Image (cartoon, rainbow, N blue to C red):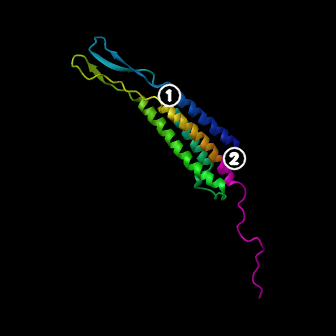
Amino acid sequence: MASKLLMLTIFVFDLIAFGLAIAAERRRSTAKIKQDGEDDYSYCVYDSDIATGFGVGAFLFLMLSQIIIMVASRCFCCGKALRPGGSRACAVLLFIICWVAFFIAEVCLLAGSVRNAYHTKYRSSYLTSDKHLSCETLRKGVFAAGAAFIFFTSILSQFYYVTYAKARGGPMPYGGEAGVGMAAYK
């Protein structure tokens, strides 16, 4: 039987990660081109960098959630074998898909956090007719994609754990003879 406390804990961690990813998307850094006091140079001024912290927080909560679910299910590599049947096949399939969705979510969150923290330090001068100044910022939707994959990972990991617990289930059926074994009579 699947542990309801474990499933609730995983749900709460995934919900926090999802909320932080959405908050990171809403609070991405934006930049404006400012000019110095003498109007000789222009440079980029970035606003709040809180989205990086939100993205890292979502990254850590999702990772903690995945670690807990894999420790609870022994990550398929330790412990006794699962009972053969549809539950085991479904658990294996959900295990693989869950890890793929987890990896994509983590890459989106980590890349978004790193890219959001990157601020260009370029200046352009009106006197030397430099190229037009470009203030680089994170594209829209990187943290939102991470949030979507957090949602998928959450659903898949919950189903994975339930099917794993069902496949682990009660005692293994006896595979030997049904009759009483006896030695040859001499």
Element assignment for label 2: loop
Q: Is residue 85 above or below residue 69?
A: below
In the visual, does 166 lie left or right of 51?
A: right
Residue 149 in the image: state x and y as whole percent: 54, 38
* Residue appearing at x 65%, y 51% in the figure: 164
In-image side of 157 versus 24 (left or right): right
Q: Nearer the viewer, residue 49 or 161?
A: 161
Question: Does the magenta-highlighted stretch encompass residue 171?
Answer: yes
Tell me if label 2 and label 1 are in contact, CB under 8 Å. no
The C terminus, quarter of image: bottom right
Foreground: disc 2 or disc 1: 1
Residue 145 horizontal/vertical position (percent): 50, 34
Number of labels in the image equals 2
Of 97 and 21, the residue lying toward us: 97
* Residue 89 tag number: none
Magenta span of residues? 162-186
Label 2 Cα neighbours within 10 Å, binned few <14 / some 14-19 / many ≥20? some
> Which residue in the protein does label 2 denote?
2
Q: Earlier in the sequence, mark 2 or mark 1?
A: 2
Residue 158 screen position, x and y as percent: 63, 43
Disc 1 crowd rating (10 Å Cα; few below 14, some 14-19, many 20+) is many
Residue drawn at x 62%, y 54% as measured from the top left: 89
- Judge whether residue 118 is colored magenta: no
Residue 19 image-quadrant placement:
top right
Label 1 amino acid?
Glu
Name which residue type carries label 2.
Ala
Furthest-top residue in view? 38
Spatial CA span between label 2 and label 1: 34 Å
**Which residue does the numbered mark 1 point to in the structure image?**
25
